Image (cartoon, rainbow, N blue to C red):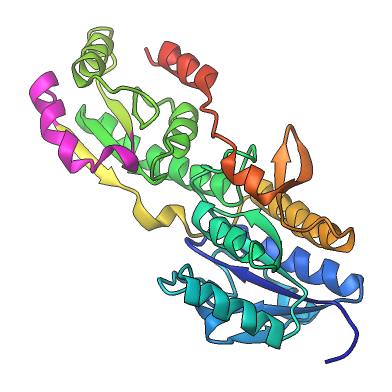
Amino acid sequence: MGDKKRIGILTSGGDAPGMNAAIRASVNAALDEGYEIYGINRGYAGLLDKDFIPMNSAMVADIMGQGGTILRTSRSDFFPTSAGLKRSTEILDEYNIDTLIVIGGDGSLTGALMLSRLGVKIVGMPGTIDNDFGASDFTIGFDTAVTTAIDAISKIRDTTFSHNRINIVQVMGRSCGDIALYAGFSSAAEALIIPEKENNLEEICADLLRGKDRGHLHSIVMLAEGCGSYRDYVKKFEELTQVTTKGTNLGYIQRGGSPTHFDRNLASYMGYKAVEAIKNDDINTVIVQRNGQYIAMPIEEALATKKIFNEEMYQIMKKLAK
């Protein structure tokens, strides 16, 4: 097998724009250090299937601007079981993988923590459009998802304006309302329905009607998926406002597409820093961005860090939505 340090890298859970930039940075940084690096296709499921491939710089030369992940991703029900975790460690030993780089969200990094407790050396990166990883200011893919949502909302607003309607725009985020908040703020949305706040529909509709009285004849309402489907709200809004209300679910378009410059830079920094952490033996960590700096935080501490809601942005948005 040789004496070179050998690294494995995988992407897991939901894909996020910028994952390829993180892969590229990790591969090239590892090769620059003289390490071998193996890509593991299809996340933890691929690990269990021994779907390994040696990576080289040519394989990642043109992937910076590609959405998705060239290593593909999947979810595995067997992996988090005691048998699945034990088998995973045996396979990593078989392939002489010294350290495993994991790019994914909270669930994927929780899986990485489980492996670390069995002796596997881990370095993680938070890759999820939801931005629900409290230890990092931003996660890989979030900025692109928001940018995609903003573009879609601008098109929806054209029709909403033309017909004097309310349109409820549903975005992803699970139990985190950041996509709705950031996209709504940038799109001058008139209202938000998000998990972090109590959502009084009567109050929201009363605010929309006050805006209508001031000559604002159409409205965009941002809905985070953690609060339910837009279908649950359309009829309620029509009843409370007597204004024709439509709904749109932006769905998976938020997860695809070429990453923004912010996500490319974020992912590239994190990928480089992941290999730097391995070089410095700063393992069982997650690379996070905090106050503009990139640090390796212990994975258990990172997973336990509570997500802080941007209350200031929320309050400013409410005041500007006139």
> Total of numbered circles in the picture?
0
- Quarter placement of the C terminus: top left
Closest to the observer, 232 or 12: 12
Single out the residue that lies furthest toward the bottom.
1
Whether residue 184 is situated above or below residue 208 in the rendered picture? below
The x, y position of residue 185, in whole percent, is 47, 27
Q: Which percent across, then down, holds residue 16?
A: 54, 58
309 lies left or right of 66: left
Q: Is residue 235 magenta?
A: yes
Q: Is residue 54 above or below residue 180?
A: below
| Image position of 45 (left or right of 126) | left
Q: Residue at x 23, y 43 (%)?
A: 229
Membership of 230 in magenta stretch: yes
The answer to which of 14 and 240 lies nearer the viewer is: 14
- Hey, which quadrant is residue 301 in on the image? top right
Residue 222 horizontal/vertical position (percent): 34, 33
Q: Quadrant of residue 306?
A: top right
Please tell me whether the stretch drawn in magenta is mainly helix, strand or loop. Answer: helix
Q: Is residue 72 visible?
A: no
Residue plotted at (48% across, 46% down): 130
Which residue shows up at 41% across the image and 38% down it? 154
Q: Which residues are magenta?
A: 223-244
The N terminus appears in which quarter of the rendering? bottom right
* Residue at image point 48% right, 67% down: 80
**Image-based side of 226 in relation to 90, left or right:** left
Location of residue 248 (image quadrant) = top left
